Image: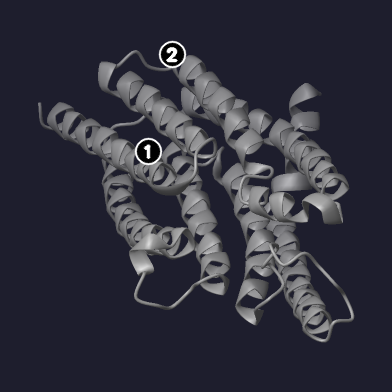
Amino acid sequence: MITKLRNFLYDSVLSESVKNKVERTILVISILSFLAHLIVIFLVKSNVIILPESVGFFDSPIAAIYTPFSFILIYEVYLLIFYLPRSITTYIGKQYEIITLIVIRRIFKDLANLELNSDWFDIKSDLNFTYDIITALLLFFMIYIFSLERQKLHDSKKINTLAPAQLEQFISIKKFMATILVPIFIGIGLVTFTSWVLDGTPANLSVAIKDVNSIFFDQFFAILIIVDVFLLLFSFFYTDQFHKVIRNSGFIISTILIRLSFSVDGLLNNCLIISSIAFGIVILWIHNRFEKNINTI
């Protein structure tokens, strides 16, 4: 009875058909939000709406791209939860994709604030744009490397895997965790967004716009750290192999580094993001060498 209820709840929020519906809904909302942002920019340019000069979020049509990207990130969060029961490495890879999209989204905001002159390296907004462009390229390449190592791991599992009953048990645990995560993240999203809107008064709108990069996602990755720890603990029921324990522990450290990046700005933020994914890649690479060595013995 409990198993049937758990499967029903899981299928209600994380089935393939639900994923397709969420994808279409997010696409429609993204298009509408992009148009709405463009309209606000037009009204600001026409002096119909007066905003503080320091906001800068409604000065250029380029900044409007930021808004649909925010909804695309919401879909990526859903995909992360969707892939959790299927593969831990795919789930971690989704974390890396989300933080990369956050950097890409930030670039669109940086573009709207560029000051093209000879003092490029003396202007904070131009420096932030430079850091973000370089970081985005590095992250994209590192995610590619991570995907190659992840595929090697999946290929090795065709040779060496858990017993069918153990595998089914572990997947059931991950499905249960994923099902719980959906209402948790919806709740966090509603609370943080409502708080941000209420705090975004004209007097402090520029501060609220600055904080939009970290809204939701600092709490989001804090929850993911807890999820990663639970995955590590539950994995002990099915394996005590040293290299798997270190891999899962390394993924927790990687998530913590991403979470820490939201507490700082500028170059240190970019360095933390890059180091988090680099650490995950090295951990997975060493793990795969262990796995290959075990399979050849």
Relative horizontal placement of residue 135, taking residue 28 as reference (left or right) = left
Q: Is residue 92 visible?
A: yes
Q: Looking at numbered disc 1 in the image, what kind of residue is underneath it? A: Ser
Q: Nearer the viewer, residue 13 or 193?
A: 193
Residue 174 in the image: above or below residue 35: above
Q: Residues within 10 Å of mark 1 (few under 14, many from 20)?
A: many
Furthest residue in direction left, as rendered: 297
Relative horizontal placement of residue 245, taking residue 64 as reference (left or right) = left
Q: Looking at numbered disc 2 in the image, what kind of residue is underneath it? A: Phe
User: Residue at image x 50%, y 38%?
Assistant: 264
User: Residue at image x 77%, y 73%?
Assistant: 28
The circle on residue 41 is none
Question: Regarding mark 2 in the picture, which secondary structure is present there?
Answer: loop
Mark found first going from the N terminus, 2 or 1: 2
x%, y% of residue 73?
62, 56
Residue 252 in the image: above or below residue 138: above
Quadrant where the N terminus sits is: top right
Q: Answer yes or no: do the residues labelled 2 and 1 have beta carbons within 8 Å?
A: no
User: Residue at image x 54%, y 35%?
Assistant: 263
Circle 2 sits on which residue? 236
- Choose mark 2 or mark 1, whichever is in front: 1
User: Residue at image x 35%, y 45%?
Assistant: 274
Relative horizontal placement of residue 81, taking residue 53 as reference (left or right) = left
x%, y% of residue 267?
39, 47
Question: Regarding mark 1 in the picture, which secondary structure is present there?
Answer: helix
**Quarter where residue 269 is shown:** top left
x%, y% of residue 17?
72, 59
x%, y% of residue 113?
55, 70
The circle on residue 276 is 1
